[in-house]
């Protein structure tokens, strides 16, 4: 049996750039339809997207609203990781993150990247 393919999307753009914030989720949803294991990682300003109440305010022209993209991502069992040092620097408490957002530090992220077939950064 062949190993399942895996892809990691790293997003460094938040609400200040709705198009770049949306692209990883657009691609992640497409990858999961293709039965590719998918992880989206939020780093830098993108961590604000994982804060409760933020997603419904982000919408890029040409795409579904980001909240809908993220909801579809979770419905397909997508994994969302949030950079631990990034949320600590921005004083975001883990309790303030949306459901299914998993805090992840550098070592665990490195393992995810090493086990993936591809990693893309937005």
Image: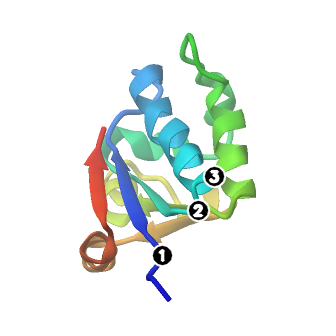
Residue 63 location, x and y as percent? Answer: 59, 20
Residue 33's tag is 3
- Mark 3, secondary structure of its residue: helix
Eyeballing the image, is 7 above or below 108?
above
Describe residue 73's horizontal placement relative to residue 40 as left or right. Answer: right
x and y percentages locating residue 52 in the rendered image: 66, 46
96 in relation to 108, above or below:
above
**Image marks 3 and 2: residues in contact by CB distance under 8 Å:** yes
Answer whether residue 97 is visible to the viewer in this image: no
Q: Identify the mark nearer the N-term, 1 or 3.
A: 1
Classify residue 104 by image quadrant: bottom left
Q: Secondary structure at mark 2?
A: loop
The type of colouring in the image is rainbow
Q: Residue furthest bottom?
A: 1
Mark 1, residue position: 4
Contact between marks 1 and 2 (CB within 8 A): the answer is yes
Q: Residue at x 69, y 29 (%)?
A: 56
- Answer with left or right where residue 9 lies relative to residue 56: left
Q: CA distance from mark 1 to mark 3?
A: 13 Å
Estimate the spatial distance between the alpha carbons at disc 3 and disc 2, rounded to whole Å.
5 Å
Residue drawn at x 28%, y 48% as measured from the top left: 120
Depth check: 61 or 4 in front?
A: 4
In the rendered image, the quadrant that contains the C terminus is top left
Disc 2 target residue: 35
């Amino acid at each position: 049996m062949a190993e399942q393919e895996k892809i990691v999307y790293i997003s460094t753009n938040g609400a200040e750039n709705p198009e770049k914030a949306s692209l990883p989720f657009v691609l992640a949803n497409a990858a999961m339809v293709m039965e590719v294991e998918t992880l989206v990682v939020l780093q830098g300003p993108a961590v604000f997207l994982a804060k409760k109440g933020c997603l419904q305010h982000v919408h890029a022209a040409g795409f579904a609203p980001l909240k809908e993209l993220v909801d579809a991502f979770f419905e397909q069992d997508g994994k969302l990781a949030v950079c631990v040092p990034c949320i600590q620097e921005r004083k975001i408490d883990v309790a303030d993150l949306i459901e299914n957002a998993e805090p992840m530090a550098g070592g665990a992220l490195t393992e995810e990247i090493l086990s993936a077939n591809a990693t893309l950064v937005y």
